Image (cartoon, rainbow, N blue to C red):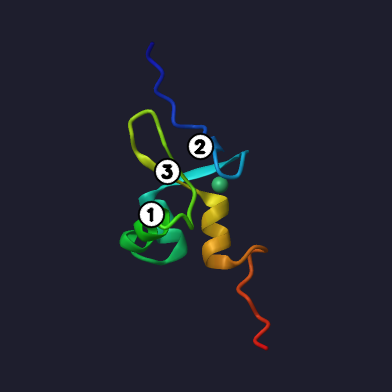
């Protein structure tokens, strides 16, 4: 079976239990403006959801990334006291 399309990045996240956008480590670090090391650390401590594609490439759940770095509503927390 020769299927070589990368068009769909939607994937079932085992953590969210929903179809979410999964991005690779490069995109994740660029988006969050942190190092890939930071991404890996968060994957390891369970903060970030992840999955692997058919090639064994690590993919990060965009929703978890958003919640980690941008807050649940996509905004940085503004209530300081
Ligand atoms: Zn997720």
Name the disc covering residue 9, or none: 2
Query: Mark 1 to mark 3: distance in Å?
Result: 13 Å
Element under label 3?
A: strand
- Circle on res. 44: 1
Q: Could you tell me which quadrant the C terminus lies in?
A: bottom right
In the current view of this chain or complex, which residue is farthest to the front?
45
Residue shown at the point (64%, 69%) measured from the top left:
75
Is label 2 in a helix, a strand or a loop? loop
Residue position for label 3? 59
Q: Residues within 10 Å of mark 1 (few under 14, many from 20)?
A: few
Instruction: Give the percent coordinates (x, y) of residue 19.
Output: 61, 37
Q: Give SS at disc 1.
A: helix
Q: Nearer the viewer, residue 4 or 45?
A: 45
In the image, what residue occupies the spot 34% across and 64% down?
35
- Give the vertical position of 73 relative to 63 (above or below): below
Q: Position of residue 57 (x, y in %)?
A: 34, 38
Identify whether 69 is placed above or below 80: above
User: In the image, is the residue at mark 3 within 8 Å of ligand 1 by its beta carbon?
Assistant: no
Mark 2 or 3, nearer chain start: 2
The disc at residue 3 is none
How many other residues sit within 10 Å of disc 3, few (<14), some (14-19) or many (≥20)? many
For the point 54% across and 54% down, which residue is it?
A: 64
Task: Tell which tag, 2 or 3, sits nearer the viewer.
Answer: 3
Instruction: Out of 8 and 50, give the one closest to the viewer.
Output: 50
């Amino acid at each position: 079976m020769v299927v070589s399309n990368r068009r769909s990045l939607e994937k079932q996240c085992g953590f969210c239990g929903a179809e979410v956008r999964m991005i690779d480590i490069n995109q994740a670090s660029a988006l969050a403006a942190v190092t890939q090391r930071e991404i890996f650390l968060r994957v390891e401590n369970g903060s970030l959801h992840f999955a692997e594609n058919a090639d064994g490439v690590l993919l990060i759940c965009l929703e978890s990334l958003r919640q980690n770095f941008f807050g649940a509503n996509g905004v940085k927390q503004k209530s300081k006291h």
